[in-house]
Image: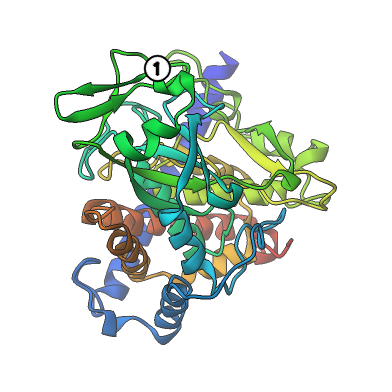
Amino acid sequence: MIGRRCALIALGGLLILVLSVNVYFIRMIVESSSHKTSSKSMPISQLKPEQEQLISQAEQNLQVSQKSVAKDMWPDAHQLIPPVAPELGTILDILRKSKVMRADNAPLGTQLKLMLTLEHGTKAMFKPQWYSRDAIIRGPVYHGKDRHNAEVVAFHLSSLLALRRVPLTVIRKLDLRNEIRPRATPELYATMYQDGNDTCLYGVCHYCSPADPVCGVGDILEGALISWLPRYLRLVKHRHPWQRTYKKNKLAMWETDDNYCEKVKDTKAYSPQSSSRLLDLIDTAIFDFLMDNGDRHHYELAQNNFHNPAVLLIDNGKSLGNPDVDHFDILAPLYQCCMIHKTTWDRLKLFSGGSLSIALARLVAHESLMAGVQPLVTEAHLSAMDRRLLTIYAVVEYCLKNKKYASNVILDHR
């Protein structure tokens, strides 16, 4: 009875929030109607100067130079890429082109992934392409296999939002017959075979099976190549407080308890007075809502004697599922805690008026060009991000209205 009453109270609060979102939508549409008819048709010349400057800086970082770069020169416990990174494009190009020295099954996770050792000892994880760009994943938000293009889109979105906590990620096309098979470990080699003119493999993992292989087009398999983080970071995995139950008939505590966030804040790990971890998880919820990633059941921190390490945004493959659906409960940490980093809020406001999709499209288009592949994200997914950003604005406005003072909501903790 108590659980049912809590659920009804939560539903009532959600209804009020949805109404606030609708009002905010109307206001934003009216305010932006003179500037923008649709996110995909808005010309670049209509971007505000500060928006154009930010996008241009990000594009400049992606340019390839001939300068040599040091290995593991960036990652630390607070960011994986610095704000200004003129070497970024060169490092990404090295990931795309370095010779594969060894190919093995990736040691972690439930899906097929390859662990590649590249020249100079660099390690990277390869997630193969399972879906076409315009495939729509229906069902629960965590349904389906990883979308390899989502990993690349997540990398560039994190850069735009100044949440530089996604590992370096590029698109790479592997030649399975000539590049992987000769350098495969015996365990991986045993899962590779020819299906007509196509080279296929099914790998070794929890869900891997000969009945569910991935095949190249001929010998070529497209996928996302994700840089493996250096050992000195000593990543430690933690259970996410807003983890789903992954069961149809069982709700998690955060789905039924209106005061759930207060209970989370009472624990030492998530107290806003002792660390920014809770605010980082709220950043993560915002990022995941934009990407439509509802599968963040754990998170990772670099805990090698670092002070107040940031929550890293690792494993973004369950994003970009259905552009027509917004899974509002991904935002639960934001609307239940009503807190947000000031730096995150300032950056989100900068991308109003449909400029987020424009900026992201430009960065991802550069990756498509460099990798020689089809566009990596559809207009539908880009438009969905603009739409979801309006929802985030509405939630923060709702919190500001209910918390009385802006300093109770917008916190400068990092």
Q: Is residue 86 above or below residue 251?
A: below
Q: Residue furthest left?
A: 196
Q: Is residue 98 above or below residue 412?
A: above
Residue 37 visible at all: yes
Residue 326 visible at all: no
| Quadrant showing the C terminus | bottom right
Q: Residue at (73%, 52%) from the top-left corner?
A: 276
> What residue is pinned by disc 1?
190
| Quadrant showing the N terminus | top right
Judge from the rendering whether residue 216 lies leftward or rightward of residue 237; answer left or right: left
Q: Is residue 82 above or below residue 197?
A: below
Crowdedness of circle 1 by 10 Å Cα count: few (<14), some, many (20+)?
A: some
Instruction: Return the x and y of residue 278 as percentages of the image width and height.
Output: 69, 46
Local secondary structure at mark 1: loop
Q: Residue at (27%, 33%) from the top-left corner?
A: 137
Instruction: Return the x and y of residue 370 as percentages of the image width and height.
Output: 32, 63
Picture quadrant of residue 328: top left
Q: Amino acid at mark 1?
A: Ala
Instruction: Return the x and y of residue 151 as percentages of the image width and height.
Output: 42, 46
Instruction: Return the x and y of residue 138 as percentages of the image width and height.
Output: 26, 30
Q: Residue at (43%, 62%) from the top-left corner?
A: 93
